[in-house]
Image (tube, rainbow, N blue to C red):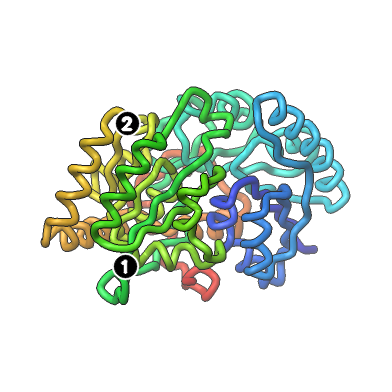
Amino acid sequence: MKRKILFDLGHPGHFHLFKSAILYFKKHPKYQVFVTTRNIPMILSLLNAAQIEYHILGSKRNGMLGKLFSVIETDIQMLFFVLKNKIDLGLHCGIVLSHVSLITSMRSWIFDDDDDEVEPLMVHFSHPMSEVVFTPNCIKRKTKKAIYYPGTHELSYLHNVLDSNEDLKEKYSIVRLVAFNGHHDVGHSGLSDAQLVTLVSRLESIGKVFITSEKPLTEQWEKYRISISPDKMHGFMSAALVVVGDSQTMISEAATMGVPAFKCNSFAGALSVPNMLERDFGLCFSFKPNQFDLMIQSIDQVLDDSIFREKMVNGLHRLRREKLNTSILMIRCIEDWELDFSRMSQFTSEEWLSLCSNFEPCQEISQ
């Protein structure tokens, strides 16, 4: 009998994190794969482009009260879906599957790369209810269910992406703006309108500027908007001179591809994964909004430093040597199935790298 695995996607980043594992197990004769998501246009576009079948459950609303209703609605629909399809294992980055696992036989594995301090809802209403919480080892958690591994979410889908700046036909920079409407974004902020004017003016002096934004853009900025399908974005980012913005995910993605990445938001210095990329590998830079002028100076220094690219490439090579491809970790753990999590919680980085080193990469993981 086939084991039934469910991947629940609540954010475009979840699609990228789980994509390789989804494609791998869809071809595996011993497994049946299900994918659920909300009615979020970017996720649906990515799933359609990858030709992955999915089921839309629940909805996505803004505001704390709206999010509460969304969780309740999705909990109920997910419960019936899991029972109907007799799901054995659910992989996710959110709350809903944790709740459903409490009253079904489904196992729940969370892949979470945010710090406890910035996600109290996950800490109180998801981590305690799941079997394990897979966590990059630069983060320390309160829960004893954490399994720490040497990697990041971005390495699950950007591990083999190579920098292509040397082949540029046209120099350009990318600015990423986010809406700050997540439950963990309350009280936080990013680039102001005045700072955006200054930033775009500076970047235009070295080439073309493209803007990608979660929030609506005023008419002034519409001409800068990127018109590219979501599944092509990482390739487009890999050829940029710099990526600058108030996003967490896209800045870490750019850094993982060896593109100079500058983040300006009130989370600067507070998140372990970006801090690790900056402190240990020199792959990105973070600034609070009141340090905007300092960020502009840093961008100028990087663009004028003829040997910075070499330093960054060296940092990128070290990152890929010392951290593992998270997709391989995910697949190995699912295939082993009967895991000794108490033993795995004590794994060293060397043990994790050894566990995943003898896995033969397949096309789904390499792309």
Query: Total marks drawn?
Result: 2
Nearest to the observer: residue 266 or residue 225: 225
Look at label 1 and name its amino acid. Asp
Image position of 275 (left or right of 48): left
Query: Which residue lies at the image location 65% right of the left edge and 61% below the top edge?
Result: 45
Foreground label between 2 and 1: 2
> Where 102 sits versus 22, above or below?
above
Query: Which residue lies at the image location 31% right of the left edge and 45% below the top edge?
Result: 199
Q: Quadrant of residue 333?
A: bottom right
Nearest to the observer: residue 108 or residue 224: 224
Query: Which residue lies at the image location 60% right of the left edge and 23% below the top edge?
Result: 124
Measured as percent of width and height from the top left, residue 288 is found at: 32, 31
**In the picture, which quadrant includes the N terminus?**
bottom right
Q: Which residue is mark 2?
A: 288
> Where 238 sits versus 338, above or below?
below
Measured as percent of width and height from the top left, residue 335 is found at: 60, 60
Secondary structure under tag 2 reads loop
Look at label 2 and name its amino acid. Lys
Query: Which residue lies at the image location 83% right of the left edge and 41% below the top edge?
Result: 77
Q: Which residue is mark 1?
A: 163
Give the crowd class for mark 2: few <14, some 14-19, many >=20 residues within 10 Å. Answer: some
Label number found at residue 95:
none
Nearest to the observer: residue 347 or residue 148: 148
Nearest to the observer: residue 176 or residue 149: 176
Precedes in sequence: disc 2 or disc 1: 1
Distance Cα–Cα, label 2 vs label 1: 27 Å
Secondary structure under tag 1 reads loop
Q: Is residue 340 visible?
A: no
Give the crowd class for mark 1: few <14, some 14-19, many >=20 residues within 10 Å. Answer: some
Measured as percent of width and height from the top left, residue 70 is found at: 74, 34
Image position of 86 (left or right of 99): right
